[in-house]
Amino acid sequence: MIEYQEISIERLLPFPIRELREDVLKNLEERINKRGYNNARPVTVVKSSDNFNVIDGNHRLSIAKKLNLSSLPCVIYPDGENIYKLAIEGNLDEDTYAPMDLFDWLDIIKKLKDEDLTQEVIGEKIGKSVDMVQFHNKLLNNIPTEVLSLCKKAQEGRVGGETTFVGIEINNETIKIRPFNFTEGWFRTSGLYNISGEFQKIVITAFIKDKCGWLGDKLKSETARYKLYSDFIKICNDELVNLNTLQMMIGLILNNTFKTEEALLKKIAELNKQAENKLICGDCLIELEKIEDASIDIVITDPPYGIDYVSNRSEFSEHVTRDGVNNDKLQEALSLLDNTCQILSRKTKADAHINIFTSWKVYSKFEAIIEKYFTIKNMIVWDKGNHGAGDLKYSRGERHELIILCTKGNRELAKRYDDMVSIPKIHSSKMIHPTQKPVEVIKNLLEVSARKTDTICDPFMGSGSTIKAVKEMKELDLRYIGIELDKGIFEKARSFINE
């Protein structure tokens, strides 16, 4: 049974199913201050023990407390009534101070969701269909609070009149807008659900700044554009080898640089090639471990031979051949070779070629180490066209070095040359490293082993001849990894390679 009664303010408990609106509170305060409380507008309450929950009239209750009123006229419903349904019916009344809008419905549904109620139960409580609840729930799940707050600032009925331009603040900027009636259906058909919250904010901000004047096609074209941007960014996330370039790519995407996915993929391929190419100054035993397992197709390298090399024949004392080589004592060189081969056995692909320069003086020792990890196929002789110094009195001049060709797995040759390479050595006056190899010798090895897009590694890069050869064989589009311990030599090699 419904009763009508004056109830003291202390016994009236706020039960707002939606947020209180500042403009309504302001208008009510001015009206009550001027004319007093209108007893023809009682608040609606539901009895709860010794007190009463206010289900319609929470704006009035808030101002009554602020103005220190002692009591309010109330329409009383008995305990057990559907409090949410009654509250909504009151808010939908044509005489209400603040008619229900989208954001009120979202507040109610979110409040009930937070009570762990199912969509069916929520529908029963608010007197709406399950479909209506599902649509609003989907909106809550797809549109971030920050974006909804922007829309709420421009919502018709909350700011100004339908034809009145009003000023609102967006991103610390006051702009003039015509209020807009945001609805669940508008969001559902806008395309906003298909883009990220960040892009939603960009679109909504632009929509409001354009005085909420976009027609449907304009809105959909904007969301479609940002959907394409989202797709492009996802492709970058999935395909870029070096994610340090992601922000740069996002900038290009948002600048509308890529008209098609094909253009985007072409740019990604360029960046990936750059990312795969590495020149590293450091200890190869440390740096090789950082490389992905089974990622190297070919190794071409010239490690310390262990012969404590220093030229006895250089014409000038400043020639680099008089500088000697790091780690060139026999035992340290052999230990280094063993450790390097052990790591390379993991870093090379299932079918790989490994080319290792050496001297006849340590060939047997190199052979014993290398064959623990790879299958030796050839001992290639490099005829340098001119002998070195060596023992100037008691032995014949040496005009060759050896290259051990070995395999991991069953990689076939790209071309079949014989086991002699006759290419003149570099004059010492032109060397930047004491044991520098001619680029043409390295190209000969690559012609035998390399296929398109192979990754070539030189753990003892020295002068950079291997990497320079790789870069000059443009038709094969090869990738490279070069590692050099000596900082001074590394910088000279970079210049020689033209990096």
Image (spheres, rainbow, N blue to C red):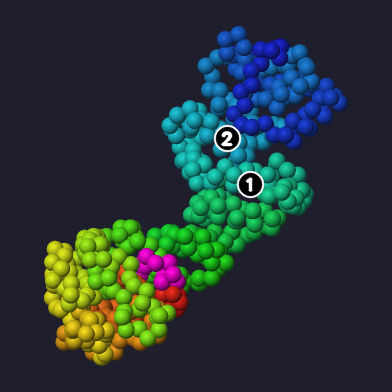
Q: Which residues are magenta?
A: 478-491
The reply to whether residue 486 is in sight is yes
Return the residue found at the far front.
393
* Residue visible at 56% across and 23% down in the picture: 83
- At label 2, counting other C-alpha atoms closer than 10 Å, the crowd grade (few under 14, some 14-19, many 20 or more) is some
User: Looking at the image, can residue 415 be seen?
Assistant: no
Q: On residue 151, which mark appears?
A: 1
Q: Which residue lies most toward the right here?
A: 34
Q: Can you say whether 345 is above or below 450 in the image?
A: above
Find disc 2 in the rendering and name its residue.
Answer: 107
Name the image quarter holding the N terminus. Answer: top right
Does 17 sit above or below residue 379?
above
Residue at point 72% right, 34% down?
22
| Nearer the observer, 480 or 256 | 480
Specify the quadrant of the image occupied by residue 267: bottom left
Is residue 103 depicted above or below 456 in this figure? above
| Amino acid type indicated by mark 1 | Cys
Query: Residue 289 has which mark?
Result: none
Distance between the Cα atoms at labels 1 and 2? 14 Å
Q: Tell me residue 283's x, y (percent).
A: 35, 61
Left or right, 303 with respect to 233, comes to left
Viewer-nearest residue: 236 or 226: 236
x, y (%) of residue 339?
23, 60
